Amino acid sequence: MAAIPELEAIRKTQILDAALNTIATSGHANVTMDDICKAAGLSKGGLAHYFKSKETLFRAAFTAFFDRIFQRSQETMTAIDDPMDQLLSFDWLYDLEDPDLNIGYPIVLDVMSIAAHDETYRTIFHDWINNWITLLEGALRKGMAKGLFMKLDPEATARTISAIYQGIATRWYLDPESHSTEWAITSFKQAIKGLMQPYLTQPHT
Amino acid sequence: MAAIPELEAIRKTQILDAALNTIATSGHANVTMDDICKAAGLSKGGLAHYFKSKETLFRAAFTAFFDRIFQRSQETMTAIDDPMDQLLSFDWLYDLEDPDLNIGYPIVLDVMSIAAHDETYRTIFHDWINNWITLLEGALRKGMAKGLFMKLDPEATARTISAIYQGIATRWYLDPESHSTEWAITSFKQAIKGLMQPYLTQPHT
DNA sequence: CGGTTTGCCGACTGATCAGTCGGTATTGTT
DNA sequence: AACAATACCGACTGATCAGTCGGCAAACCG
């Protein structure tokens, strides 16, 4: 019997963290179960006790990661009051010192490349995006309610804004030599402000 | 001896095409040399005669693909005169009927995910982006020379524009259920027009 | 106490796959 | 004709790896 009842939860997060770190470092295609065992400090059999197969583990790891990122986004955004500032609040994406992001970029790129061939991963991606959209949509609706933004399609606009963030972030991460952090931050601000400009009832400070 | 002297070139493109199609269908991580042999109508030994290793073949295939896409972009763009229309000329990206693009999206996503862990692929990505940037930069410079755009940083702006295209295209491809083609086209036009708005000397028709 | 369950170990197995190599056939050269 | 080089074949090899399984130890149960 387990000494502590929460052992299972502890082990699972321990394994999921190990999996995420290993995948982020080597890429999902190059990761073996042995690598993850080593990173998690468990044996093959021990790991098998908690996750039946590699696929199960990978999916759980990716899902766990996206949940974590969503929490972050939500917390950052709700700490801000002005709707326009909320739309622009994702500058924390451009910080590789942040451990979540450091592993996050490779993970997201891996998930997207798998999603191109796998229905299940497409769903994971879809769900993640939808969370993101819900947050941005909230800010847009609030702005309309407050009379700051004119009438617009909040979902479509939210999708455009998040796609802009993602496009710029991908460049910034994969080719930092040509895409500085200043470029990234200036770019997303200009792009999003430019997009919102026609809908603003008053100039944004 | 070869019956026809161009045999080598023929075989190589035949193999590269087979590789690209197979990778696009299954994802680079799931493709075996045997798969490619079958697709190319050659045996293992036959294929080995032209490409020494899987890595060599993959790199050659990806590079060949990016060259092809660059050609396309260049041709499309030079057929257009107005600089602002040139910036907006990439709506051909949003057409899955196009065979190049049909295989192109999975390929690009694969390359990006590999690039996250592999210097060589980062270079391939970097070079591809730079080609793209050069084209957009040309349009921006022409616009400035013509007095249509006010003074701006052409490289940084070109990078922002192409990042917007890519962000929107990725969404459109991976989650079409939530990102319609109309959304994609409206989005990139709004975003790019919004971005350029402050620099326009006269309203764009 | 004996018996059972849980947690974990790591050697083993079977499958997969990249790359090799001896061979054949066709074309060209002398 | 003899020889050589190129183009291609496919059986084989060695390495890798996911998943299995028998076993052990510690904790709990009756």
Image (cartoon, coloured by chain):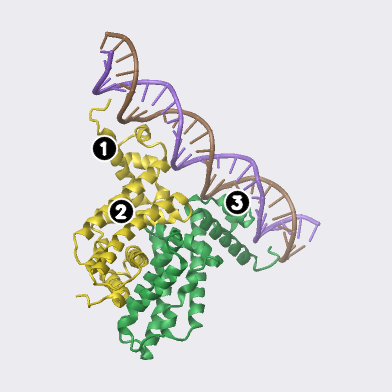
Chain colours: A green, B yellow, C purple, D brown
Q: Which residue is mark 3?
A: A44
- Closer to viewer: mark 2 or mark 1: 1
Q: Check the image and report above or below for A14 versus A164.
A: above
| Horizontal side of residue B126 vs A18, given as left or right | left
Disc 1 secondary structure class:
helix
Q: Amino acid at mark 3?
A: Lys
Q: Which residue is mark 1?
A: B10
Return the mark for residue A178.
Answer: none
Image quarter for residue C12?
top right
- Measured from the top left, where is residue A150 in percent x and y? 31, 87
For the residue pair B174 and A201, the one nearer the viewer reads as: A201
Q: Amino acid at mark 1?
A: Ile
- Closer to viewer: mark 3 or mark 1: 1
Disc 3 secondary structure class:
helix
Q: Label 3 marks which chain's residue? A: A
Disc 2 secondary structure class:
helix
Quadrant in which the C terminus of chain A is drawn: bottom left
Q: Can marks 3 and 2 be said to lie on one chain?
A: no
